[in-house]
Image (spheres, rainbow, N blue to C red):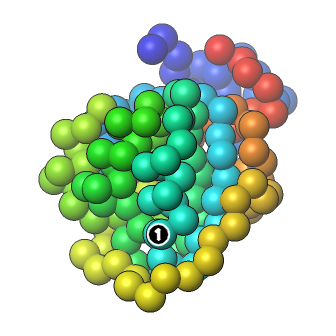
Amino acid sequence: MSFFTADLCDAHFEKVRVLNPTFQSYGGKEKIRGTIVTVKLDKNNHDLAQILRDEEGNGRIIVVDVSQEYYAVVGENLIKFALQKNWAGIVVNGYVRDTDQTSKFPVGLFAIGTCPRKYIPQTQGVRGIELSFEGVIFKDGDYLYADNDGIILCDEKIV
């Protein structure tokens, strides 16, 4: 995958939106790109698990906002679903767990940190809505590019 977010920012500075530098890589793939699907969760990952388990990813990236609630919403099981269904990656405005295992799967996983617990009561999520966190607005269909230098978005495909 031949792109670098730094080069994309230089070449397309007027088009890209740059996420604040709070995200770290916890997946086995540190460089991802693709169109995004947005999901807003209320602590519980049930709706996210259904999407990753049941829907073909076709190289897309799912962006999940849980408002930085201190519960893990992605772990070993969900990263396996993502791999099986061809999702390029997951970006979580929140926390993940099972990182020794998630780092072994060739799927991008970016989050603000780790947390060993998950939220057990099932809550309802919302898909396909505009999200806003860490200085960036995310819309279904935006293009996301991520590597070791950061995560950027653009309204259009630039690579």
Q: Position of residue 9 (x, y in %)?
A: 67, 27
Against 79, residue 59 (above or below) is: above
Q: Give the image quarter of residue 28.
A: top left
In this rendered view, identify the residue nearer to me: 15 or 63: 63
Q: Residue, x 63% and y 71% (percent of image)?
A: 125
In this rendered view, identify the residue nearer to me: 46 or 107: 46
Q: Position of residue 81 (x, y in %)?
A: 36, 46
Q: Which residue is mark 1?
A: 45
Name the kind of residue labelled 1 in the image.
Asn
Q: Residue, x 38% and y 85% (percent of image)?
A: 120
Whether residue 67 is visible to the viewer of this picture, yes or no, is no
Residue lying farthest left?
A: 100
Against 122, residue 127 (above or below) is: above
- Image position of 102 (left or right of 31): left
Residue lying farthest top?
A: 2
- Quarter of the image that includes the N terminus: top left
Q: Position of residue 154 (x, y in %)?
A: 75, 33
In this rendered view, identify the residue nearer to me: 1 or 51: 51
Q: Give the image quarter of residue 67.
A: bottom right
- Quarter of the image that includes the C terminus: top right
Q: Position of residue 80 (x, y in %)?
A: 30, 45
Against 64, residue 147 (above or below) is: above
- Image position of 77 (left or right of 18): left
Q: Residue, x 19% and y 39% (percent of image)?
A: 104
Q: Secondary structure at mark 1?
A: loop
